[in-house]
Amino acid sequence: MQEKMIALVTGANQGLGWQIASELVANGYVVLVGSRDFERGREAAESIGSDAHVIQLDVTDAASIAAAVDRIRSEFGHLDLLVNNAAISNARRPGRSLEENMAASRASVASIDEMRTVWETNVFAVLALTQAMLPLLRAAPSARILNVSSGVGSLTLNADPSFQYRAGFGVIYAASKTALNAVTLSLAIDLEPEGIKVYAASPGFTATALNNFQGTDTVEVGARNLVRAALDTESPTGTFTGPSGILPW
Ligand code: NAP
């Protein structure tokens, strides 16, 4: 019998991460359900099934990353797929409306402290976790990394005055996804000689805690492109996609 592929999904205790994790399990993967709160992750893994295993992982915490690497090394010896899904949209109180977030993200008024906090999770932690997982990814026959990004981070789209989400191109969340795109492309170029593929993918505009449930897609529909990209072994490395196909960086 062929061995099951091993995947780690960060921030998989809820929202799009949970959906990706559960569809990876449905597609025959063993999935490590990353959650900064162990108990919430345990419940999430249990709701998915026996091939989903909780792993405590706060992506901004070096000790938590190191413990996750140790655990995956000792239990599985390698990692086939890393899905960098965890992200935050702001650093304020929960339940802030999309409109409030957008207003506070405008370049002319944005709090630099809030920008640092959001970029810490959405950008620097992604690279820190990826670097830490690289020995395990290198130990897999053909590893892949999927960074969950957003069309709202595309410089090309935002430079076009007719782009419908242009007013939302703030420096706190949207530009963190631009920076994540740059990290994605940089990783793709760096890891290409080793055959490790690196993708960025955007979901649809999905009703989750990230946007105070103001998104218009259900999690099942919104996650479709993320699930497709997570299962993709054929596309060239450095591909950025959204629900309607290739997105421009
Ligand atoms: P969500 O429901 O808020 O999920 C975000 C997840 O990230 C939660 O599990 C959260 O954990 C986790 N997280 C936050 N900081 C973390 C940390 N330091 N360490 C570990 N986990 C952490 O939002 P979502 O919409 O599903 O977001 C998933 C991804 O999709 C994000 O990358 C987001 O930027 C992207 N995205 C979403 C949309 C959309 O319309 N929803 C559109 C474009 C892109 P807690 O539960 O502990 O907070």
Image (tube, helix red, strand yellow):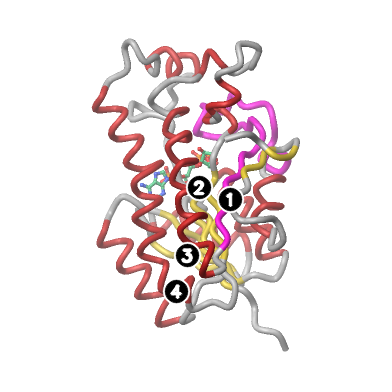
Q: Quadrant of residue 225?
A: top right
Give the residue type at disc 2.
Answer: Leu
Q: Earlier in the sequence, mark 1 or mark 4?
A: 4
Residue matched to label 2: 185
Q: Which mark is residue 136?
A: 4
Q: Which residues are magenta?
A: 197-222
Question: Quadrant where the N terminus lies?
Answer: bottom right
Question: Vertically, is 168 above or below 54?
Answer: above
* C-alpha distance separating marks 1 and 4: 20 Å
Mark sitting earlier along the chain (2/1): 2
Q: In this orientation, which residue lies closer to the viewer: 128 or 95?
A: 128
Vertical comparison of 128 with 202: above or below: below
Left-right relation of 179 to 16: left
According to the image, label 1 marks what residue? 238
**Identity of the amino acid at label 3?**
Val
In this rendered view, identify the residue nearer to me: 58 or 152: 152
Q: Residue placed at 60% from the left, 11% from the top?
A: 161
Mark 3 = which residue? 54
Residue type marked 4:
Leu
Spatial CA distance of label 2 from label 1 is 6 Å
